[in-house]
Image: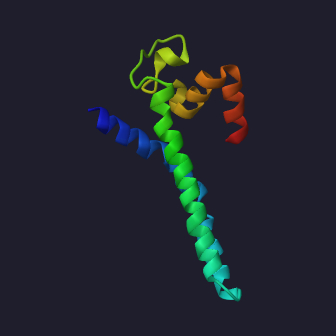
Amino acid sequence: MVLVNMAVILAVVQVGSLFSSDAWNNITFTAGEVKNPSGIYRCRWYWDGICADGVLSGVAGLPVVLPMHGDPNGATVMARGIQYAAEDRVATAALQQIFHHGGAQIMARRS
């Protein structure tokens, strides 16, 4: 049951990152215009790997910061947990737990 919940959480959290990396499709068109196009492809794969590692590390860290299950009427971020994060914003809830009120400010500036 926990493994299924984790798979669903991973799938939902990665939707935004998939759309944000869509611009990399356009960079491959420029490869025909440069003298050494293999550098562009190498750069793309390295950067995609770095981004994927960052996203997976962040998602894997969520259960460390917040409990998986919580109370829908919980008064704090920790009481609600991942299951009942406010407006389904799990990363914002995790940052609020780490940085208190500054966590919401950090996430608001990033999104």
Q: Position of 65 compared to 29: left or right? A: left
Q: Quadrant of residue 5?
A: top left
Instruction: Work out whether 94 lies above or below 38.
Output: above
Residue located at (63% from left, 72% from top):
26
Q: Quadrant of residue 20?
A: bottom right
Name the spot of residue 12 as percent of width and height, x first: 45, 43
Name the spot of residue 77 as percent of width and height, x first: 54, 18
Q: Position of 10 compared to 48: left or right? A: left
Q: Quadrant of residue 70?
A: top left
Instruction: Work out whether 97 lies above or below 17.
Output: above
Location of the C terminus (image quadrant) = top right
Location of the N terminus (image quadrant) = top left
Instruction: Work out whether 105 lies above or below 48.
Output: above
Name the spot of residue 4 as percent of width and height, x first: 30, 38
Name the spot of residue 49 as percent of width and height, x first: 54, 59
Residue located at (39% from left, 22% from top):
69
